Amino acid sequence: MQRMEALKKEISLLPFLKVEGKRKLSGHMRVSGAKNSALVLMAASLLTNEVVYLRNVPQLTDIDVMSRLLRAIGSKLSQDSNTLTLNTSELKLSSSHLPYELVHALRASFVCIGPLLARLGEVKIPLPGGCKIGTRPIDEHIQGLRALGARVQIENDYVVAKVISPQQRLTGVRIKFNCKSVGATETILMAATLAQGTTILENAAQEPEIQDLATMLNKMGAKIQGAGTSQITIEGVDRLKGCMHSVIPDRIEAGTFLIASAITRSTLTISPVIPEHLESVISKLQKCGCLIEYSDNTLSIIPRESLQAVDITTSPFPGFPTDLQAPFMALMTTVKGTSKIEETVFENRMQHVGELQRMGAKILLEGNTAFVVGGNILKATSITGGDLRSCAAMVIASLAANGTSIVQGLEHLDRGYEDLSPKLNGVGASITRSHSQVQKTSNLTTKTYEDTQNLYSDTEVA
């Protein structure tokens, strides 16, 4: 009795998905706005004292955290469905000190250092947090800001930066990044828009999200050329104005839907998409045996019943995206042959391998390279996603498994997928989101749903 009372003290309601496998999908799936773009566009609003209207913003927990952060430093935000109105006209110098708990919760918020430094002349921001998928150092951000004329120091887990020129403006310069860092490219790109003179970024990241950022900044009056190539030129201007801008479709969500179609051997149409953003993914799916048809901003995917294994190596855009490595590995467990999947972007992004093995997948992991022996029938079980994309992979795998799976780790999934369960249910999946009373400690949260039910009943939510 005493042991049971002690257990009850450690019990909390944890959300999970109940996914019924082996169901065919059919119909159309709507792609939301790109989370990774929307977050940086929100930060870019700090560069102007006029109003910025952002449309096609996904409703996600990461967006909520960034909204809270911007409000905490003086921005006025309002949201109507998927449209955000951002007004940063009342930013004061005190706004340059960003709250620790919010920056630590959302790594993408670190890019605020660029616009705040350019507009206010100084900024104090905590070292970033985020998913535990690798070190992701901020050296490139710091070196770039120093090259633009800022004094940057790290003091007690904070980055403190200040413009040192008498004119209180950054100065344009040629910067060559040591690696293709998306975050550093975004940070320096934003900071350079208000710098004196011309800045040239060499070895810049080429991701579509950077192109989207440059497009919005140019609408605001910036003078940027070359975004989407490895060399970007920014001619600094005195001020930026407000604008209205629509966030590009989320290529990672679109890729996830394509893989969901392939793993269930189901025909789907997906829109809106920008096909050029998905070329590496489409190419691999075609080599697997999927027919993919284009029509304006719509893709239709028709998988063969028997798909073949293909190898992938993740790399920066336009290569195969690291964010789709985990879902693609789930697909490879169900095809004919053996595939080699190599992760080169993040050193700790194979957390999903063990969970897929628990479902019956045959995977040999050597460092950051996985050898996947396909053709196995996945079996339903209780699985947990350790980060955003591995949690998506767990849902994808569950769609193909025999039986009903329980997917935990939804705090990660909710960061990056808007209404994933309703969207999949809309094309024939059977996914129920519930809360189960489970022990906070990991040794119980990984137990099967049936075992958990023996302790406490779950309460389904809408």
Image (tube, rainbow, N blue to C red):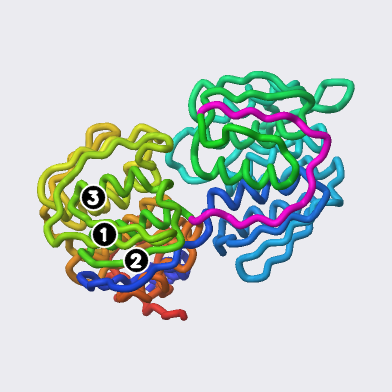
Q: Nearer the viewer, residue 151 or 253?
A: 253
Can you identify the residue that label 2 sits on? 269
Q: How many marks?
A: 3
Mark-to-mark CA distance, 1 and 3: 20 Å
Specify whether 138 is left or right of 171: left
Can residue 383 be seen at all in this image of the molecule?
Answer: no
Q: Position of residue 139 (x, y in %)?
A: 58, 25
For the point 35% across and 32% down, the residue is 344
Start-end of magenta stretch: 230-249
Q: Position of residue 10 (x, y in %)?
A: 46, 64
Q: Quadrant of the N terminus?
A: bottom left
Q: Position of residue 453 (x, y in %)?
A: 31, 75
Q: Nearer the viewer, residue 145 or 132?
A: 145
Looking at the rendered structure, which numbered label has been put on residue 170? none
For the point 34% across and 66% down, the residue is 269
Looking at the rendered structure, which numbered label has been put on residue 397? 1
Q: Earlier in the sequence, mark 2 or mark 3?
A: 2
Q: Inspect the image, locate mark 1, and give the three-letter code of the amino acid beneath it.
A: Ala
Q: Earlier in the sequence, mark 1 or mark 3?
A: 3
Q: Inspect the image, locate mark 2, and give the three-letter code of the amino acid beneath it.
A: Thr
Q: Inspect the image, locate mark 3, and give the three-letter code of the amino acid beneath it.
A: Gln
